[in-house]
Amino acid sequence: MQTPNKSTKNRLRFVLGVIVTIVMFLAWRLFYLQVYNNEDLKKGALEQWTKGIDIKSNRGVIYDRNGKKLAVNVTAYTVWATPADIENPEETAKTIANILQMEENVVYEKLTKNVSTEKIKQWITREEALELRKSSIRGLTIVDDSKRYYPYGDFASYILGFTDIDNNGLDGIEKTYDKYLSGIPGKIVKTTDAANRQMPYDGEKIYDPENGLSVVLTIDETIQHFAEKAANQALLDNKAKNVSIIVMDPFSGDILALANKPDFDPNEPREPLTDEQKKEWADLPIEELPNKWYDMWRNVAISDVYEPGSTFKVLTAAAALEVGSANLNTHYFCNGFVRDIKGVVLKCASWYNPHGNQTFAEAIANSCNVAFVNMGRSLGKENMYEYIKAFGFGESSGIDLLGEQSGIIPANTDVIKEVNLATMSYGHGIAVTPIQMVNMFSTVANGGNLMKPRLVKQLIDEEGNVLKTFPTEVKRKVLAEKTSETMLKLLEGVVKDGTGRKAYIPGYRVGGKTGTAEKIIDGRYADGKYIASFGAIAPVDDPKIAVLIIIDEPSGVYYGGTIAGPVAKSVIEDTLNYLEVEPKFTEDEKELIEQKIIVPDVRNKKIGDAGKLLTELELRYTTEYQEITTDSTVLDQFPLPGVEVIKGSIIDLYLNEKPNILTMPDLIGKTKDEAIKILDELNLQYTLNGTGKVTNQSPGPGENLSGETNIVIELSDT
C-alpha cells in the first residue's frame, strides 16, 4: 500500500480541520439557541402557531347624578376572517357581500390577504350575524361586540363627548375618563399550522375581557333639559351665533347643567344638524371638513374667552367691600362721563340720562360705569389685580374637560395704567371664560369659597359598588361671609329694582347682574357684534344654584338685561320648582299676583308718552337703548297689547334705536315759495321774515334738527 505523500497529508489535515470547525460552530450555535436564546425562539414560534382575535370589553356606562343613563352600549357584532381557512374565496366573497351589503371585490380582497386574521365588517346587525352563522362559512368568525350609544341624541354633547369606531374616547368625559371607562379587552386564541390552518387537536382558548367602570356625573338630566330647552329657544329668538348656559351648585362646585347651542349629536359627531350646515358642507373639499368638525365640537363654555362687561362689576364691588375701600354708605356721582383720564373719555351706558348722586347699592342696581370707575380707583390696581387672581381669572378652573382656556388678564400690576384700571372695573380690557364667570357667582353665593368645578362624582362597577369617589374641592377662600351676605342683598336689588328686572320671579329671591359687551375679533372691537350675558344666584336667602347665560352675537336687541335676563328667569324658575324649593311670597307679591292689568298698546308712541301711560297703570318698562331722544318711537312691545299681566310687570319696549335725524336744508338763494315747500315737506315749524329770496337761515345748512328747534328764515329783495 502506497503511503500518502506529504502534500496529500496536508490536504487531509485541512479538510479535517474544516470539518471540525464546522462541527464546533454548529455545536456552539445549537448550544446558544437552546440555552441562551430559547425564550425568544419560543415566543416567535408561539406567534407563528397561535392566532388571536380581540374581544372588546364593554365600555362603562355614563350616568347622571340620579342614575339616568346618558351613554350606554348596544349589542353589535364584528366579522373576522382567517384567509388561510377560506375555501373558494370567490363564492365566499359573493355570499358575504350579499348578506352584509358590501362590494364583492372589497370582500374578496380581504379574504385573500396574506395575513392571519382580517376584519371584514364591524357592527353588523343581529339579523346579519344570524344569517352568516347559518351559512357555516369555514374561516369566518363572528364576535359579539358593542357600540356606543347616546339615548338622548344631541343632549349634553359637550359634557359626554363621543368615541371612535373602536370605542376609544375622543372628546368630553369619554376622553378624560377613558382609562376607567374602556376596561381590558379579552382574546380568542387558536393554534394554526404553517398554512394558517387550525390544528385539529388544539381547541380555541377564550380569555374573557374585563369590563370598564361606569362614571356617575354631577349633571342632573332634568336640569340639563331645562338648560338645553332655554338655550335653543334663546338661539332661535335672538338669531344668535351661539348660546351657552351653565347651572352650578355653589356649595359643592357641582355642574348641574352645561348646554351650548348649536351643538352636535354624539351618535353621529361628524354630521351637521341643520339643513343650512348640510348645504354648506356639501360643497366643501374633503380636506376642509375637519376644520368644520373642530368648530362644531368646540366647547364655548370653557374654550371661548370674551369681555364680560358689567357682570364683572360683581368682582369690583365685592373686592371694594372686602378691603374696605367702599361700604354701603359710599356715594358716587354720575354726570354721564369720565373725562379726567388723559387721552380718553369714558361714558356711562346711561350717559344721556345721568344717574346723578347714588349710593353703593344704587350704583350696582344702575350698573353705572362712572361709579365703578371711581370704585376701581379707590380700590387701587394692586387690590384689583389681587382679587382678579383670587377669583380664578387667568387660570384654568380645573374642570374635567379638554380645551379649557385660562382667559386673558394683565401680566402684573406694572402694566395696569389708569385707563386699564378704569375699564377693568366695569369688565372691559379683560377676557374670561363662561366657566370662570359662573364660578365667580358661586363664590359670592357660598360664603366666599372658590370651588373647583366638579363633573364626576363617582366610579362604580357593574353591581353599583362605589370604587372611587371624587370629593368636592375648595381652591381658596376669597371673601368673608359678611361680604358674601352683603353682595347677595345687593344683587337681589339689581333684579328687584335695577337692570336685572327681567329675571324677577315672584316668590323667589333672585340676585343677578346683567352684562353687555362688544366682541373683540382679531384684536379689535367688531362693530355691531355683542355678547349679552346674565349671571344669577337663587334664592339669595338660601342659594341652591348659580346660573350664567351667554348669548353671542344676537340680532337686533343685544342688551343682557333684555334678552339674557328672561332666559335666566326661565332656567331658575324651572330648576327651583324641580328642586322643590318652596316659594315665599311677600305681602306685596301676593297683592301683585291678585291684581291683573291689561297691557295697553303703546306702539308708535313717543317714548315719553308710552312711559307715562305704563307708569299710570303701575306697570314698569325697560328699553336699555343707549341712543334715546325725545323723538324715539316705540316700534314694538312685549307682552303684546291685550295680554293680562300682574301689577308691576315689566313691559319691553323696542325703539327705533337710531331715530331719523333731520338736518337743516340749505335754503340760501331760494325764493319764499321754494323755501316754504321744502320746510313743509319736512314737517318743520318755522318763522319767515321779509320777502324775496333767502339770505340767511338759522340753524345753518347741515345742522341737526329736533322737534324743539326754532327755525328762522330771513328773506330780502336785494
Image: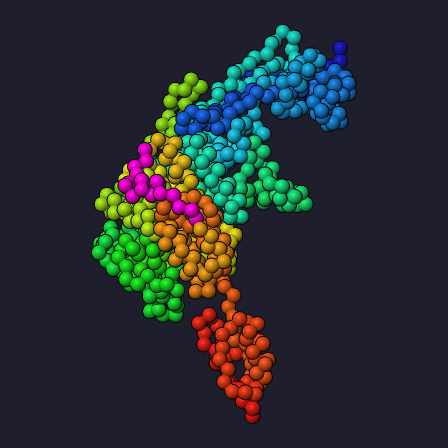
Residue drawn at point x = 36 percent, y = 35 percent: 576
Magenta residues (range): 582-599
On screen, residue 371 versus residue 694, left or right, reads: left
Q: Position of residue 67 (x, y in %)?
A: 42, 24
Please state, as top left, top right, bottom left or bottom right, where the C terminus lies in the image.
bottom right
Q: Please state which of residues 630 and 140 is positioned toward the viewer in this rendering.
A: 630
Residue drawn at point x = 52 percent, y = 30 percent: 152
Q: Position of residue 314 (x, y in %)?
A: 33, 50
Residue drawn at point x = 64 percent, y = 45 percent: 280
On screen, residue 525 versus residue 108, left or right, reads: left
- Image quarter of residue 287: top right
> What colour-coding does the image apply?
rainbow
Q: Position of residue 196 (x, y in %)?
A: 67, 17
Question: Is residue 589 in the magenta section?
Answer: yes
- Image quarter of residue 419: bottom left
Q: Position of residue 465 (x, y in %)?
A: 39, 20
